[in-house]
Amino acid sequence: MAEAKTDTAGVWECKEFKALSEHSEETSKLHLRDLLSTDGNKNCQKRNEQLIIKTSDGITLDCTRQKATIDTLSKLIDLAKQSNLQSKINAMFNGDKINITENRSVLHIALRAKETDKIIVNDVNVVESVYKVLNKISTFSKKVRSGEWKGYSGKAITNVVSIGIGGSYLGAEFVFQALKTDPVARKNAQGRQLRFYANIDPIGFARATADLDPETTLCIVVSKSFTTRETMMNAQFVREWLVGAYNGDDKCLGSHFIAVSANPTLPVEKFGVDKDNIFEFWDWVGGRYSVSSAVGILPLSLHYGYDVMNEFLKGCNDIDCHFKNTELSKNIPVILGLFGVWNTTFLKYNTRALIPYCEALSRLPAHIQQLDMESNGKRIDLNGNAALDNNCSGEIDFGEPGTNAQHSFFQLIHQGRVIPVDFIAFCESQLVKDELYNDKMKKLIKNNHDELMSNFFAQCDALAIGKTAEQVRKELESKNMDKDKMESLIPHKVFTGNRPSSLLLFDGALNAYKTGQILSIFEHRTVTQGFIWNIGSFDQWGVELGKVMGKGIRKQIDAAKEDQSNEDKAKYFKEFNPSTQELLKYYCEKSQ
């Protein structure tokens, strides 16, 4: 049953939304092979001009393979205007408290603003606060990297373990992997290791610390609230590892334990972290939007150097400015967001794949999965209307680098369910200008990159155009196949096509600046969709229930395990349903 609406109607009640609903029925009769052809579409050239965006610094967005006519984008922009998209963007950049349920500003854009910018929140220019922390990170990372900051035994620090989960981990790991084979970052990181410890599973600890010397390791506890249960327990685990290496002398922690938090008193109280070794971020930074804060910049600067990470921040800022100042029809994050709305809400595709044809972006899909699904996976809009019931809620996101993805799940994408795809690629490989490789190797690198890119372009068109039964028949006839066998095989080799995708192509190779651009593009795409649907993209109440229940279950497990009597332990779990009672009782018996 649909939920009762409040006095303020959902976006689906406006005439622009209804016009798009009608338009989607018209486009359902069209095929991309015709829309992409000058023979099948007299407006093909005009449509291409409308759906291909090029920036002055070498970014190309090609949306010609979206199921859109020459009228679709203008209708989507009409919906964006009716939804006050530009006003909402401006409100975010101005520091208005657009996180309605938590009464907070949303200012991840301030984390990479220019030092001369001013954003006032509660009578404070938050940009000054940001640069105070950035300057502290710059100074500290240079001390550690130069050897001036030493471990408790006097050894130089060469290893960093970053302890955090969710938004305190995924974004930083994405950037870490993206820059691992960038020539400048790779050279800066020689002789160093950066590990991430996120999962509460103790195996995560074993893997994060494997082969590391505690005496040369710096551990960063990353938690906005400093109350996240998994992170606090993992930090305790690492604390014992460090103290144990120094025969129980907890004074070692001053040289090996630092923190990133929006709650600067708790790291001191809980772990004895020196207050000078706490790097601040703020309640106006959401966890999943925090990679450009000390959450990501601190560990990554320790590993790659602050200058590299400053380039990353500049790339973020470039797209931030583009998002704020560029007209909607030429605005890359806006156009991606609008087609996300088109595919999800109007064409009813509830899944989206992100496929980077760049191995360095292997962890981008995981980060965007959290960013998008935690932001826009909402049941109601900000006025309590049933957003999900009206397809005004976020997609299921997943992805994997190409060409690995082709050998994994592209069978389904080509011949199974329709899943819109966002493709990303670069005109050059990161390796082609790296002095590590000689000329013969660079020739092979270029050859392999051309092969990679051939697949990139082929997959986009294969999804859109497909392969008809007649084309398959001609192909099999040329092989002199038996007619009966041929006719039985033809249906299996048909590709219906008409499967939408967008292409992001960057000039040059992936570097720190472009990594920042990519992050900002996808952050603002998510925000665009949330603004149009009028849902709360900046809270995450959906993660709370399981955590609360988990705490209750843990108390009962502890009580059952502490009971050394021979009595039936089922009494500890009587508040749960019979199935859960049996599972908990069995677990306690088998895990003593």
Image (cartoon, rainbow, N blue to C red):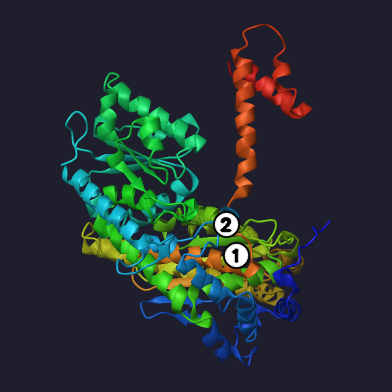
In the rendered image, the quadrant that contains the N terminus is: bottom right
Q: Is residue 448 visible?
A: no
The amino acid beneath tag 2 is Ser
Q: In this rendering, is residue 428 above or below 551?
A: below
* Residue in the foreground of this view, choosing between 481 and 512: 512
In the rendered image, the quadrant that contains the C terminus is: top right
**Would you name the residue on which mark 1 appears?**
530
Q: Is residue 496 left or right of residue 253?
A: right
Q: Is residue 100 visible?
A: yes
Residue 484 in the image: x percent, y percent?
77, 66
Q: Residue at x 57, y 61 (%)?
A: 353
The amino acid beneath tag 1 is Gly
Q: Residue at x 60, y 45 (%)?
A: 543
Q: In this rendering, is residue 2 above or below 28?
A: above
Q: Is residue 512 left or right of residue 324?
A: left
Query: Where residue 375 is drawn, which disc sits there?
Result: 2
Q: Tell which circle, 1 or 2, labels the residue nearer the N-terminal end.
A: 2
Based on the displayed image, in which of its 4 quarters is residue 310 positioned?
bottom left
- Distance from disc 1 to disc 2, alpha carbons, whole Å, reads 8 Å
Q: Residue at x 71, y 62 (%)?
A: 387
Based on the displayed image, in which of its 4 quarters is residue 449 positioned?
bottom left
Q: Residues within 10 Å of mark 2 (few under 14, many from 20)?
A: many
Residue 373 in the image: x percent, y percent?
59, 55
Q: Secondary structure at mark 1?
A: helix
Residue that sits furthest to the front in the current view: 123
Query: CB of mark 1 within 8 Å of CB of mark 2?
Result: yes
Residue 365 in the image: x percent, y percent?
50, 56
